[in-house]
Amino acid sequence: MIKLTGPIALLFPGQGVQKPGMGQSLYDRYPAARRAFERAEEVLDMPVRRLCFEGPIEELNRTEIIQPCVMTVCWAAYEVWRESYGFENVRVTAGHSLGEIAALAAAGSIPWETALLLVKERGRIMAQAAHQHAGGMIAIVGLDESRVEAIREQASSKGKLWIANRNADVQFVLSGQMPAVQEAERLALEAGARRALILTIPLPAHTPLMAAAAAAFRKAVDRLPFKPPAFPVLANASGEAMRTVTALQEELRQQMLRQVDWARTMVSMKTMEVKTVVELGPGRVLASLAAKHIPGVDTWNADELFVEFADTATA
């Protein structure tokens, strides 16, 4: 087992990290991960292993499929973490958008099975919203907030557009109507962005255009049996630590409408003097952001910690 320095933050990714093969290394290696996948298939009534391990990517990219599948990989990674390390040195948890629900489950506020069903419903609601309010999202990397805001204002001449994610000082996601998203791509490249990528998410997430979907999701949230978290959960909207049932409920009720301010989440982790970040889920998007923006932090993702380096580790 690799020795990790506390305080530790457990992070959970959101939509966009999916790819065929995700979670298979954990499944092949750990009984805890196998049990998680098998239980997820029962709870969700979906062929989760086939979708996660084989795809095809066209099916895996469907909103109603992505969300419960990514959540299952997070659950499998969490179960391996729980058996391997426990929670003695865990100071805080956080998740990006969809991952925020995984973070609540990891903190013990809702059971994992309940979280899976909530995510399945979230995916269904958002897929339905995509048919009613077609739209898109674009990631822009390498421009500061004032330049991204100027691009958003210019592109808004083609349709409604908002800043949906502030992932770092020079990494943003715009979300809104597709003609405006396409115009933002042109303007961002013209302005010298290192990257301007239209995402495979066919809806205007984290904007007021999601109002009907958010109302439907609130009904599902209001039925949940929340408990206070065992350790703080950092809110997507503010980056602040949530410690009460009321705070968790309000965060989830507004989740589809509010901007994800991950940059503030990283500031909070820095303030909490987090020394190690572990991303429990597919990929290392959040771990990589932490490595760039939290001085001296040690970062791992699930495959690195439990597969790639596990055999060479010393207790």
Image (cartoon, rainbow, N blue to C red):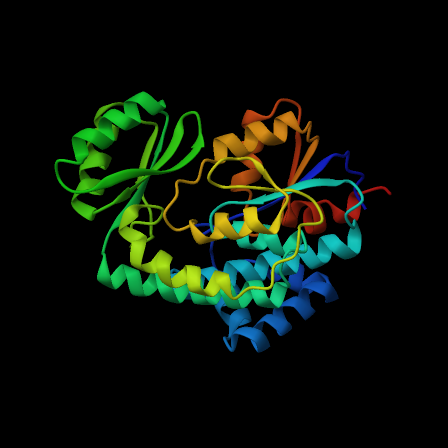
Q: Residue at x 69, y 51 (%)?
A: 307
294 vs 213: above or below: above
Counting every numbered tag in the picture gives 0
Residue 90 percent across, percent down from the top left: 73, 42
Residue 235 percent across, percent down from the top left: 53, 41
Quadrant that contains the C terminus: top right
Could you say which is closer to the camera, residue 126 or residue 137?
126
110 vs 308: above or below: below
- In which quarter of the view is residue 180 placed? top left
Could you say which is closer to the camera, residue 144 or residue 243?
243
- In which quarter of the view is residue 148 placed? top left
Residue 59 seen in render: no
Residue furthest out toward the left: 157
56 vs 167: above or below: below
Residue 268 percent across, percent down from the top left: 59, 30
Residue 314 seen in render: yes
Residue furthest out toward the front: 246
Q: Residue at x 77, y 37 (%)?
A: 4
Q: Residue at x 64, y 60 (%)?
A: 76
- In which quarter of the view is residue 65 placed? bottom left
Residue 186 percent across, percent down from the top left: 20, 33
Q: Residue at x 51, y 78 (%)?
A: 45
Could you say which is closer to the camera, residue 110 or residue 33?
110
138 vs 190: above or below: below
Residue furthest out toward the right: 315
